[in-house]
Image (spheres, rainbow, N blue to C red):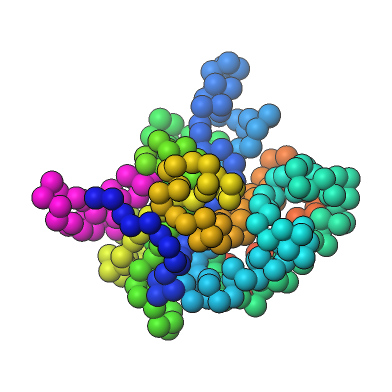
Amino acid sequence: MKMDKIKEIDTNSWHLFLDESGDANYKRLRRFKRQNNWIEFRPDPSNVTFFSLAGLLVSGKDLVESFIPAMKKVKQELYGNEDTVTHLSDMLAGKGNFTMYKNKPELLKKHLNAIINAIINVDFVFNIVHIDKVKMLNKYEENASNPYELAPTIIMERSAGYIWQSKKNTDKVIRVWFESRTKGKDKELKRFMIRELGIVFPKKGKVIQRNHFPRYKKSSNNINNIKWHIHSLPKYPSKLKQIRYYVDKYSYEIGKDLINGIHLSDIIVSASRKSIENTIYNKYKHFEVEPILEFINHSGKLIYQKFLP
């Protein structure tokens, strides 16, 4: 059944924006172990070792009335374009629209502070899951879970628990927006989420919900009463016009507004992952992300952070 094109943002639902940092794949680590005849897995010296995922949860009303306007305003003030893609890796490298930051870490810190100050009073929360792929492989070997399946499931459970405790007058509906990769991978992830949520679609068109949640310890007892809607979004607004897959799903104006949730999730999760990986494996020195780390640790908006395994 073809879904209607999304022409406006649902203000009665909750919205969960998922974005990752790091590679979810184990192939490089397995190749390094094999090539070096290691007894156990060791960190990849040329690539990231952690996979991290952040889930930013905001009510539809706050998303439309506060979050999106705040993000667009600060982007316009800093970059002269409210649709700027604030991709933290590009900002740190001084690439593309961010050449102004090349060899100017203090300027980047100043602008990251501006972004944080723009949204600090907006009512939203977030969860973060960090997966150490080296430890995961050493503990579970071939049975190690796919990080890009394990992490969102945990965040979705925690988000469901949060909204059941919230007193906001909203429907118990969560629209999950995850950053698109490829059409095939998007469909694969959606299938996994649907399977975990227990939703099946018989041939006659009748929808049946068989609840598999909770899968993990301390998950919400109310998870089964949530209605889930799974969506993918590109990180770059231009793709909303270039790729038919998105043209059929969103109006351009709605799509580029929603992407702001992905952009802030990117900043949060990238800074967090770089900090954690530096602490454990001494890989990064990006002190200019300190404003984001201060926000994560002291704003009160982080409601859950999980380290695996």
Q: In this rendered view, identify the residue nearer to me: 230 or 74.
A: 74
Question: What residue do we see at 58% from left, 50% from top?
Answer: 237
Q: Can residue 33 be seen in this view?
A: no
Position of residue 64 measured from the top left corner of the image (x, y, whole percent): 53, 72
The residue sitting at 71% across, 62% down in the picture is 75
| Spot occupied by residue 132 in the image (x, y as percentages of width and height) | 55, 43
Q: Is residue 70 above or below residue 166?
A: above
Is residue 39 depicted above or below 180 in this figure? above
Residue 72: % across, % down? 66, 65
Magenta stretch in the rendered image? 189-213
Q: Does the magenta stretch include residue 192?
A: yes
278 inside magenta stretch: no
Q: Nearer the viewer, residue 80 or 300?
A: 80
| Residue 262 in view (yes/no) | yes
Front residue (pair 48, 109): 109
Residue for point 70% across, 45% down: 89
- Image quadrant where residue 213 sits: bottom left
